[in-house]
Amino acid sequence: MLQRRIAWTIIALLAVAIAWTGIVDEAAEVHAEDAFTRALVTFAVARTLNGVISLAQGTEVALEPGGVGVNLSVGQLLDPINDLIEQFSSVMLVASTSLGAQNVLLRMTSWWGVTAALAVAGLFALVVLWWPRPVTNHWIMLGTRMLMFALVLRFIVPALIIGTNVVANQFLEPEQRSATAALEATAEEIEEFNEKTVPLDPDASFIERLSETIGSTMDAMDVEGRLDRLRVSVADATENIVNLIVLFVLQTIVLPLVFVWLIIELVKGVIARTTTLR
């Protein structure tokens, strides 16, 4: 049909023009870099939290206010979250690798050779569609399918990156930022707790030891409150870690697979209609 030949002609010309200008590639690159940067920041926060927890494990709060001994094991409090942090670090490593691979694939599909292949496929499709003499349906199917294959090869990665990140930015990114900021606050709180449990220096002067003893006594008076706050932070961190695992699995695995499936189904539907072009 004439209308469908015109539609295929517009598709071919528009696709080649977009491919040569690189507009879609630039937009995809911006999205990919933003997602990769967020993943690296979250991964760094996870490693920082893992480091301060490792430092705190085995730490024993030993304060003696008024001659009364208070011994509390901080490591026991942090043990449940430590394994989760290790698993989360592994997930973030996979997520960062996936996003980095998308950047590499984007550079491959935007290579001029792939664009030239699309131009050749588009030219061949236009020839078989507008050849003045009658052309068999076999050649029409071959031309349109070659064009579709070249279109998918050239634009599937940019479409995948843009589609995934548009959805992620709209629904996932705010919660990712919030959870990452909460983990940073937890890491700072644990680090501060570690600093407050440093033992007295035996080589310090009398005034320094007296000052530190007074400070330790004041800290000991609030040790239960500090531990309660630390328990709350650990519980919140556990929830935030689980949320981040879910969010990054959705962004780097589930959503890309969904978009790939949608693109394949779209291509299959278009190819199924090429047999009725004439």
Image: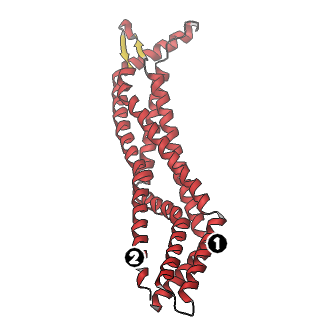
Give residue 158's position: percent from left, percent from top: 53, 63
Between disc 1 and disc 2, whose residue precedes?
Answer: 1
Q: Nearer the viewer, residue 153 or 172?
A: 153
Relative vertical location of residue 64 with respect to residue 149 in this rendering, above or below: above
Query: Which residue corresponds to mark 2?
Result: 272
Q: Nearer the viewer, residue 198 or 238?
A: 238
Neighbourhood count class around disc 1 (C-alpha, 10 Å): few under 14, some 14–19, many 20 upward: some
Give residue 105's position: percent from left, percent from top: 57, 56
Q: Nearer the viewer, residue 174 or 85?
A: 85
Specify the label residue 92 is tagged with: none
Disc 1 secondary structure class: helix
Q: CA distance from mark 1 to mark 2?
A: 28 Å
- Residue 121 is at least partly visible in this image: yes
Relative vertical location of residue 87 with respect to residue 244 in this rendering, above or below: above
Looking at the picture, which amino acid does disc 2 mark? Ala
Give residue 58's position: percent from left, percent from top: 43, 17
Query: Which residue corresponds to mark 1?
Result: 20
- Relative horizontal placement of residue 16, taking residue 171 as reference (left or right): right
Disc 2 secondary structure class: helix
Q: Could you tell me if the residues under marks 1 and 2 are in contact, i.e. CB atoms within 8 Å?
A: no
Q: Nearer the viewer, residue 127 or 94?
A: 127
Neighbourhood count class around disc 2 (C-alpha, 10 Å): few under 14, some 14–19, many 20 upward: few
Relative vertical location of residue 118 with respect to residue 90 in this rendering, above or below: below
The colour scheme is: secondary structure
Looking at the picture, which amino acid does disc 1 mark? Trp
